[in-house]
Each structure stands twice: as structure tokens, then as C-alpha cells.
Image: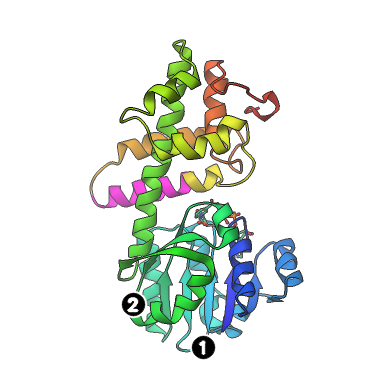
Amino acid sequence: MKVGFIGLGVMGAPMALNILKHGHELTVFDQNPEAIATLVKAGARAAASPREVGADSEIVVTMLPEPQHVEQVVLGANGVAEGLPAGGIVIEMSTIDPATSRHVGDVLRGRGMDLVDSPVGKTSEHAVTGTLTLMVGGNKAAIERATPVLNCMGTDTYYCGGPGTGHAMKMTNNLLATSIMIANTEALAIGVKNGLTLELMQEVMRTTMAWNQQFAVALPKKAFLGDDSPGFAIRLACKDVRLACEAAEKMGFVASVGRGAQATMDRAIAMGLGDRDTAALLFIREKELDIEIRQNPAPAQKAA
Ligand code: NAD
């Protein structure tokens, strides 16, 4: 199949590589020329604009930071929609709000194309191994045509419903996952400040309702090792929670837990940590309360 890919960042680059590995012809674009060069070395063709990617493809994947980037890249001047032939499909895999997803899809459908939403779950490691969770929304016929491309990138595929439901699923998932992450850092900091050790809290909480996947899996893999190297950037986690809160407010209620989580991440971004992994959220608590939550903190990694 002739496939296009736009947005070759932490997630997009390995996802695009997996499409190449499955034998599809691939045309790529990113605003960062270095990101394009890496894919070209692996066998992809470079395009000069999203329009050119569209003109060269039957299916175009987008994996971009925020809703406004998706709207601009797909519908803007020199965008994918100007080049993609009739019958072409955009697979939108970024984490964006369902309203933008439906809007972009409606415009494409009005012009004889289609959009499948398939944001992803899990981590950049799963992007490399092609084992992401895919939350798929859209029209059944378009999803069927997109499936060979989707299968290059993910193994756990969930059909969520019509247009926008994949993005609704992902936004909901990340509101919960990130709020839990931040609740962990808050509780652990209060515990240490009150004389408890991380080890004791792990031992006790493993047996109670406080136990969760962020505590059990995510925090030990990075934050507890003093590692906040780029993985899931705070600026992106913050964007996901903000989008969910805004969507809630449009429906007439305040997502107060989410807004609290967002305030913590806004603070981290103001401290210059937006590009660091969400692990840095633990280091901020340590700095603010003058404590060490990790047993063997690596001082060099602590928030400056
Ligand atoms: P990233 O910032 O590493 O990559 C984004 C890429 O898009 C960059 O290469 C950037 O140069 C490019 N880009 C931005 N604007 C552009 C434009 N107008 N035209 C062309 N290229 C443009 O982000 P990421 O971590 O790869 O995440 C991408 C999306 O996936 C985000 O919506 C994020 O929330 C979501 N996501 C990330 C993770 C993760 O663990 N990193 C996991 C699941 C979902």
C-alpha cells in the first residue's frame, strides 16, 4: 500500500519504521528535517509538505502533538486534504479532543475522503515493538481499509464506535492515568514528609485500594530510578488533561481532579520541565518539600 506519515517524533518515528518493515511504500513529512532524514535512511521517501504526502498516498497517518497541529496539517494550506486523492483515508493517531477529530473527519468526508481515529495507548517502547493499544473510531468500511496499516503498529485493537469515539476513549484514559500518576507523587511526598519510607508504603499499599498500575509499573521503571529522560513529555500529558477538562466544562461540569492535576503540570512547565518525562513530577515534589522519596536518588536528575 502507498502510505504517508506526518509527525516523526518519539512515537511517530518508530511507528513509521514499523510500516516500512511491513513492506509498504512510505512517504514522510515532519517540520524537523532531522526526523525526516532518519526515516529516509531507512527507506522512506521525503515529501516537502503535507500536501505532497497526501498526493503520494492512499492512506496518511498523522501523529502530531496537539489538535491545532492536526487541523493545520490535514485541512490547512498545503495540507494533506489538498493532495490526497478521492477515496483516500487519514488515520489520525495523536491524542486530540473528540470534537476536533469529528470536525476534521466531517470536512474530509465532505470532500470524498475519510478519517479513522486511532489514538494509541502504552508507551514509546511499545511503539518500537509495534505492540501499541489502538482505540479505533470511524466508519466500518474505512476502518477495514485502514486495518493492514493499523496492524503494523498495534496488537491490542479496540473498536470504540463511530467517528471521534477513539479519541474520546484516549482522552478519558489519559485524564484518569495522569491524575493517578500525580495523586501518587502527592501521597508519596506526604508519606515521606511524615517519616515513612517508600519501601514501607509500597509494601503496605500493595495490599490496599491505593495500589495502582502507575505505582506498580510506571514509577519503578523511571521515576524511582531517577530517570526523567524523554518518554511521555509533561507538556503532552498536561495537554491531554487540559483537553479532557475543557470537554467536561463544555458539557457543563468541572473536572476538579483533572484541573488539580493540570495545575501541577502547569507548574512543572513553568519550571522549564515541559519536555521531560512525567517522572519529573516526582522530583518536583522532592524539591518542594526538601525530601528524598526514592531510596537512592540521583541528585543530577533532580528538578533544577
Ligand atoms: P513528539 O513531540 O515527540 O513528536 C511530534 C512530532 O510532530 C515532532 O517530530 C514534531 O516536529 C512534529 N510536528 C509538530 N508540528 C508539526 C507540523 N505542523 N507539521 C509537521 N510536523 C509537526 O510527540 P510524541 O511523544 O511522538 O506524541 C505524539 C502524539 O501522541 C501526541 O498527541 C501525544 O500526546 C500522543 N502520545 C504520546 C505518547 C508517548 O508516550 N510519548 C503515548 C501515547 C500517545
Residue placed under numbered mark 1 in the picture: 85
Q: Are marks 1 and 2 in contact (CB under 8 Å)?
A: no
- At x 60%, y 68%, the residue is 18
- At x 74%, y 62%, the residue is 34
Would you say the magenta stretch is mainly helix, strand or loop?
helix
Residue placed under numbered mark 2 in the picture: 139
Residue placed furthest toward the bottom? 86
- Count of numbered labels shown in the rendering: 2
Residue nearer the viewer, 124 or 31: 124
Three-letter amino acid code at the position of disc 1: Pro
Which structural element holds mark 1? loop
Residue 153 against residue 172 in the figure, above or below:
below
Residue 49 place in picture, x, y as percent: 64, 74
Question: Which quadrant, please, contains the C terminus?
Answer: top right
| Distance from Cα at disc 1 to Cα at disc 2 | 18 Å
Does label 1 point to a residue whose CB lies under 8 Å from ligand 1?
A: no
Which structural element holds mark 2? loop
Residue nearer the viewer, 201 or 80: 201
Residue 9 place in picture, x, y as percent: 62, 58
- At x 51%, y 32%, the residue is 267
Q: Is residue 245 magenta?
A: yes
- Can residue 75 be seen at all in this image of the molecule? no
Q: The magenta stretch spans which residues?
A: 238-251
Three-letter amino acid code at the position of disc 2: Asn
Q: Is residue 85 magenta?
A: no
Residue 142 place in picture, x, y as percent: 39, 80
